[in-house]
Image (cartoon, rainbow, N blue to C red):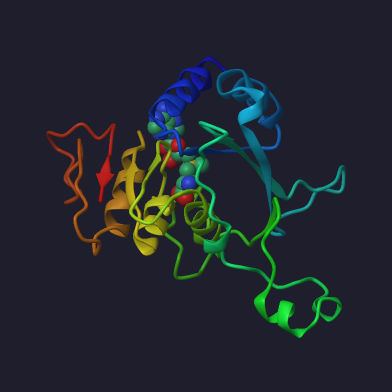
Amino acid sequence: MDFLEQRIEEFRRVLKPTGTLYFHIDYREVHYCKILSDSIFGRDSFLNEVIWAYDYGGRTSKKWPPKHDNILVYAKDIERYYFDTDAVERIPYMAPGLVGPEKAARGKLPTDTWWHTIVPTNGRERTNYPTQKPMGILRRIVQTSSPPGGLVADFFAGSGTTGAACYELGRRFLMVDDNPSAADVMSQRFATFDKVEYVGYQPSGDRQGVQPSLLAGLM
Ligand SMILES: C[S@@+](CC[C@H](N)C(=O)[O-])C[C@H]1O[C@@H](n2cnc3c(N)ncnc32)[C@H](O)[C@@H]1O
């Protein structure tokens, strides 16, 4: 918790007044993280606990198989945070026959429960980074909580899904990860992107003479 406390304080500090933090965390830890984040942001700044539900992988028969992740969402300033529901990709109604053809064709806004498959093991999106998250989840976050041209930071960037979503949606991005393999995967993923700058890393893959503990790609 000490590790997280220092970081959450810094995340809050660097957010713009219109910014939000999306804190993606395992279901076993989320309750402790909620209390910690409340103490840093203030309980009034808590917007949501998004449940990302999927249905993949093995199933225990000893308890309900855990098939969700939690994403805590906090606003830096509850009066000013950016949240654009018009930009969100709408989803099909579960019972379209009940809402009429016009509404059914338009689809509905997602709620705080997001059904979304994990990254398919053999799909085009796959980078082979072990903890890679799906583009669909990051697209939704970026579309809703950052304006076009806005700056999005991910300090645990992994394979850089946040950066890829930002590039696709016309946002600037700052990706950081302390794992050299993450930097390698990101530099491959961003290889065709315009204007990416690297700090503390050389995208050639040759790590000699550079500190591979930080990658910052800023578009
Ligand atoms: C769950 S993964 C992120 C996955 C990412 N969302 C994606 O789509 O690939 C968490 C990342 O945090 C990184 N990490 C862990 N501790 C860190 C630290 N102290 N500083 C920076 N990155 C760290 C790990 O290397 C890992 O890549």
User: Residue 217 vs residue 47: left or right?
Assistant: left
Residue lying furthest left: 209
Picture quarter with ligand 1 = top left
Residue at the location (12% across, 33% down)? 209
Q: Position of residue 25 (x, y in %)?
A: 60, 37
Q: Position of residue 207 (x, y in %)?
A: 18, 40
Q: Position of residue 163 (x, y in %)?
A: 37, 52
Q: Position of residue 135 (x, y in %)?
A: 49, 60
Image quarter of residue 49: top right
**Residue in front for this viewpoint, 116 or 103:** 103
Q: Is the residue 211 above or below the residue 139 in the image? A: above
Residue lying furthest bottom: 101
User: Residue 124 vs residue 93: left or right?
Assistant: left
Residue at the location (70% across, 37% down)? 27
**Residue in front for this viewpoint, 81 or 11:** 81
The quarter in which the N terminus is drawn is: top right
**Residue in front for this viewpoint, 80 or 159:** 80
Residue at the location (28% across, 39% down)? 215
